[in-house]
């Protein structure tokens, strides 16, 4: 079968197309024919060697996000059957409850082999059914970006109608946050540095958009839009380089979800957190239980993920390069081989 491996890690030139024997499922395992995968910024960091090498397996199959159909089951499998359409969960051992550091080794696409292959074998516990109205390409966008946004706004944040959500940029997590917030009846404010992307946001129905290039102190614009109060929820995707702006844009007692680390390094003054009485939450994807709850909401609303571009399986390197360009609006998908 065809698959990709990162060999060596440290450069995108290490992304290599390989041919290997098909894996077979053991007890309580399932084989999945992968029909589509999607990329996250994390995948660039894995390929670049940005993580502690002790936490990444040698020559891993990359990508955490994928969807396909069950083609074979091992002895004792009861959760799924051949023909079922499923998506993998990001952390294969985080099924419910709190995250546990012990689960880290089960994360796909680095600590464990990922989804950029024709066929993968996973535990029967490590998948969820795909919403029936979604195709494989759409479903492949859900495991990391969508669940991260859902975890932040609902599982952790308890978002309610009438509250204000500020989210940064137009990547996958941000656009899922936009869609989920609008679904809940919340007001949405988005920052972007591209007039083209701002036009696309407005086409989605987002009326409050701040151009951070034209307005470097964009937190002031957010305060103006909220009558001086600030946003109830801030989906912070820029990292240390935007953390201060996001805190200033937060209302007193609001919730800030620290998710991304895309904008360099800076020192954080804890006094700012105290002054805002801010609730700061570090968010790392979510559990299978959260995924199932999210899928129920997606199914009920018949929500469709925003996909920017789709690449063929043999164009995986081009998909990585496009992600690295940061030109995308929404998710980048690689179709199955």
Image: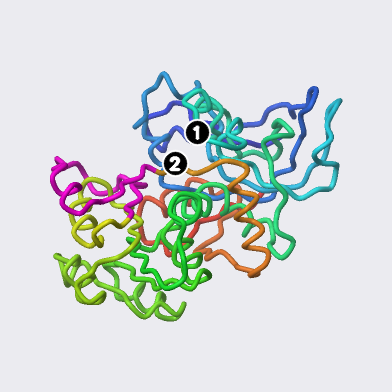
Residue found at x 13% / y 43%: 269
Is 25 situated above or below 236?
A: above
Q: Nearer the viewer, residue 233 or 67?
A: 233
When asked about the image quadrant of residue 106, the answer is top right
In front: 255, or 104?
255
Crowding at dot 1, Cα within 10 Å, few <14 / some 14-19 / many 20+, comes out as: some
Magenta-drawn stretch contains 280:
yes
Q: Secondary structure at mark 1?
A: loop
Check contact, mark 1 vs mark 2: CB within 8 A: yes
Residue 309 locus on image (x, y percent): 52, 62
Query: Is residue 284 depicted above or below 149 in this figure?
Result: above
Q: Residue 231 lies in what quarter of the image? A: bottom left
Q: Secondary structure at mark 2?
A: loop
Q: Label 2: which residue?
A: 284
Q: Which residues are magenta?
A: 255-282
- Label 1: which residue? 99
- Residue 212 lies, in percent from the top left, at 21, 67
Q: Quadrant of the N terminus?
A: top right
* Res 18 label: none
Q: Mark 2, residues whose alpha carbon is within 10 Å: few (<14), some, or many (≥20)?
A: many
Question: Residue visible at 70% across and 58% down?
Answer: 131
Q: Is residue 242 left or right of residue 96?
A: left
Could you say which is closer to the camera, residue 205 or residue 60? 205
Indicate the position of residue 19 as horizontal and vertical percent values. Answer: 66, 31
Q: Is residue 308 above or below residue 103?
A: below
Q: Position of residue 43 (x, y in %)?
A: 45, 41
Q: Which residue does the image show at 15% across and 49% down from the upper left?
A: 272
């Amino acid at each position: 079968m065809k698959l990709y491996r990162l060999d060596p890690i440290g450069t995108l030139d290490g992304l290599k197309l390989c041919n290997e024997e098909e894996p077979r499922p053991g007890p309580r395992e399932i084989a999945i024919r992968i029909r589509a995968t999607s990329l996250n910024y994390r995948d660039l960091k894995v390929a670049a060697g940005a993580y502690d090498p002790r936490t990444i397996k040698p020559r891993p199959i990359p990508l955490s996000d994928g969807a396909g159909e069950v083609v074979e089951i091992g002895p004792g499998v009861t959760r799924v059957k051949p023909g079922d359409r499923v998506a993998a969960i990001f952390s294969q051992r985080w099924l419910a409850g709190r995250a546990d550091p012990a689960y880290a080794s089960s994360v796909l696409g680095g600590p464990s082999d990922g989804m950029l292959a024709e066929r993968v074998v996973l535990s029967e516990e490590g998948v969820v059914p795909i919403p029936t109205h979604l195709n494989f390409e759409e479903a492949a966008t859900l495991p990391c970006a969508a669940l991260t946004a859902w975890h932040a706004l609902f599982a952790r944040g308890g978002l309610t109608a009438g509250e204000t959500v500020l989210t940064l940029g137009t990547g996958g997590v941000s656009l899922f946050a936009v869609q989920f917030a609008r679904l809940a009846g919340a007001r949405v404010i988005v920052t972007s540095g591209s007039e083209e992307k701002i036009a696309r946001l407005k086409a989605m129905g987002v009326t409050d958009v701040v151009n951070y290039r034209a307005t470097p102190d964009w937190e002031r614009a957010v305060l103006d839009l909220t009558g001086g109060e600030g946003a109830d929820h801030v989906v912070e995707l820029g990292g240390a380089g935007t953390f201060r702006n996001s805190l200033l844009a937060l209302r007193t007692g609001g919730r800030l979800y620290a998710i991304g680390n895309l904008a360099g390094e800076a020192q954080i003054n804890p006094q700012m957190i105290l002054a805002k009485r801010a609730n700061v939450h570090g968010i790392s994807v979510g559990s299978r239980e959260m995924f199932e709850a999210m899928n129920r909401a997606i199914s009920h609303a018949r929500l469709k993920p925003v996909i920017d571009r789709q690449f063929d399986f043999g164009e995986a390197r081009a998909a990585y390069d496009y992600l690295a360009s940061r030109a995308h609006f929404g998710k980048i998908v690689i179709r199955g081989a």
